[in-house]
Image (spheres, grey):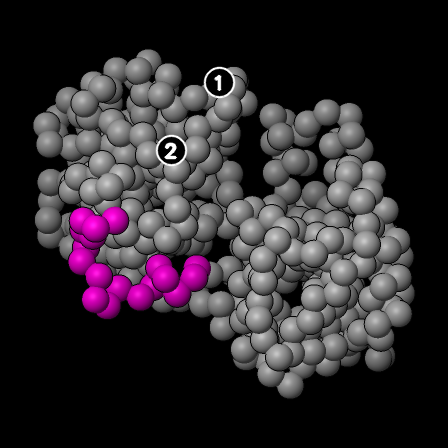
């Protein structure tokens, strides 16, 4: 089989869509060696995304502008795929072409711009969202990252349930390989100024992530568990706003003593596994997630999660954490305090974390995605 994938985010490896493209193509290439995968990009990728004999990167020139993106997705990409004679076109993010003239698979990670008002953006963003919403039923098959997102897609995009398939994501093997690494890796964490026994938040700072809840819950913990401290990791927003509140302000307003919270602004990808492994607990009370990679990364490192009982997070976390209503800061605080003080409870959740994380693997993602390619080919042949 010859498969073309849209590589629009091939030069954005730091984004979720860029990471999905990289890991998916690598897994497809490894586990389906008899097939050919062509990644079509408007510009050359900034780095070698995947190096494999059955993967080829093809530059199909396009302009990296808002209007240029739409033209490339709707006209240039499907036309190039047809000219290259591929069997299936896969757009690994929410941008289904209106006319592709070949079997097309589209991955819709979530419907955040449609469902959450703060994310609807300006007129151009709303117009783009309306357009891809209208074109979604034209895709042969839609893939999504969770059963929760699948329900949203069926309900809001008016796509038949038999044309929407859940394929879970996974994490890189650097998170799952615990052999030879200490739980607290001083060589990595001490240069970051991090000391043992911390509660970790690592992620974005837009309002959906509920960092306000993180800080409010930990403020309660700080009053009861004197040795506890909070590490908030990630680059803070350039401008403190209602949409992206500055976590340093949130921590002050919650009343967390300055000595009990630490901000690690820049975390190299290579340091993230150690940061997860060294944490006593990971807190992630997001209001909405299409999947939720940070909690899965934490679980893969054996770190229990305190998270939300909403959207996809129960599917990801399972019984390997404590799930509460994201507005229930008392429940979050109680869960954190128990994980910090009850060694037996922590040890049990640590074992559950490793078992739960083992359910997710890029090999499985690749095989189920390839089965989706075969399905759309069979449909086209009927």
Q: Residues within 10 Å of mark 2 (few under 14, many from 20)?
A: few
Q: Where residue 114 sits: x, y (%)?
A: 67, 36
Whether residue 109 is visible, yes or no, is: no
Tag shown at residue 265? 2
> Is 323 rendered above or below residue 247?
below
In magenta, the rendered stretch is 171-188
Q: Residues within 10 Å of mark 1 (few under 14, many from 20)?
A: some
Residue at the spot x=26%, y=64% of the render?
A: 178
Report which residue position mark 1 lands on.
240
Q: Where residue 43 sits: x, y (%)?
A: 73, 53
Q: Helix, strand, or loop for circle 1? A: loop
Q: Quadrant of residue 358?
A: bottom left
Main SS, magenta region, reads loop
63 vs 125, nearest the viewer: 63
Q: Where residue 39 sits: x, y (%)?
A: 70, 65
Residue at the spot x=42%, y=39% of the render?
A: 203
Relative to 166, 212 lies left or right: left
Q: Quadrant of residue 306?
A: top left
Q: Quadrant of the C terminus?
A: bottom right
Q: Nearer the viewer, mark 2 or mark 1?
A: 2
Q: Quadrant of residue 228?
A: top left
> Is 378 rendered above or below residue 143?
below
> Is 338 rendered above or below residue 367?
above
Relative to 191, 140 lies left or right: right
- First of labels 2, 1 by sequence position: 1
Relative to 262, 205 lies left or right: right
Relative to 261, 298 lies left or right: right
Q: Quadrant of the N terminus?
A: bottom right
Q: CA distance from mark 2 to mark 1?
A: 15 Å
């Amino acid at each position: 089989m010859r498969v073309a994938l849209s590589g629009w985010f091939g030069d954005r490896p730091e984004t979720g869509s860029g990471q999905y493209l990289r890991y998916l193509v690598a897994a497809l290439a490894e586990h389906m060696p008899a097939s050919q995968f062509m990644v079509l990009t408007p510009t050359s990728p900034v780095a070698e995304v995947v190096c494999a004999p059955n993967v080829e990167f093809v530059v199909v020139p396009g302009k990296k502008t808002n209007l240029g993106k739409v033209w490339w997705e709707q006209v240039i990409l499907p036309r190039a795929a047809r000219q290259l004679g591929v069997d299936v076109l896969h757009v690994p993010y929410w941008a289904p072409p209106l006319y592709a003239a070949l079997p097309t698979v589209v991955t819709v990670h979530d419907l955040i711009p449609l469902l959450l008002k703060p994310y609807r953006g300006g007129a151009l963003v709303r117009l783009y969202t309306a357009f891809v919403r209208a074109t979604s039923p034209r895709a042969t098959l839609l893939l999504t990252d969770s059963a929760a997102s699948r329900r949203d897609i069926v309900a809001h995009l008016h796509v038949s349930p038999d044309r929407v398939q859940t394929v879970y994501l996974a994490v890189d093997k650097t998170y799952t390989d615990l052999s030879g690494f200490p739980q607290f890796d001083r060589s990595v964490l001490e240069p970051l100024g991090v000391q043992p026994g911390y509660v970790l938040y690592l992620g974005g700072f837009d309002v959906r992530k509920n960092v306000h809840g993180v800080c409010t819950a930990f403020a309660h913990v700080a009053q009861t568990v004197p040795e506890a401290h909070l590490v908030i990791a990630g680059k803070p927003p350039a401008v403190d706003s209602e949409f992206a509140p500055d976590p340093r302000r949130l921590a002050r307003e919650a009343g967390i003593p300055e000595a009990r919270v630490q901000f690690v602004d820049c975390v190299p990808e290579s340091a993230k596994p150690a940061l997860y492994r060294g944490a006593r607990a990971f807190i992630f009370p997001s209001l909405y997630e299409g999947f939720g990679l940070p909690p899965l990364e934490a679980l893969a490192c054996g770190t229990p999660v305190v998270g939300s009982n909403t959207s996809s997070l129960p599917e990801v976390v399972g019984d390997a954490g404590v799930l509460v209503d994201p507005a229930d800061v008392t429940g979050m605080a109680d869960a954190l305090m128990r994980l910090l003080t009850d060694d037996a409870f922590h040890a049990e959740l640590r074992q559950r974390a490793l078992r739960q994380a083992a359910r997710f693997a890029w090999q499985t993602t690749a095989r189920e995605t390839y089965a989706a390619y075969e399905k759309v080919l069979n449909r086209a042949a009927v």
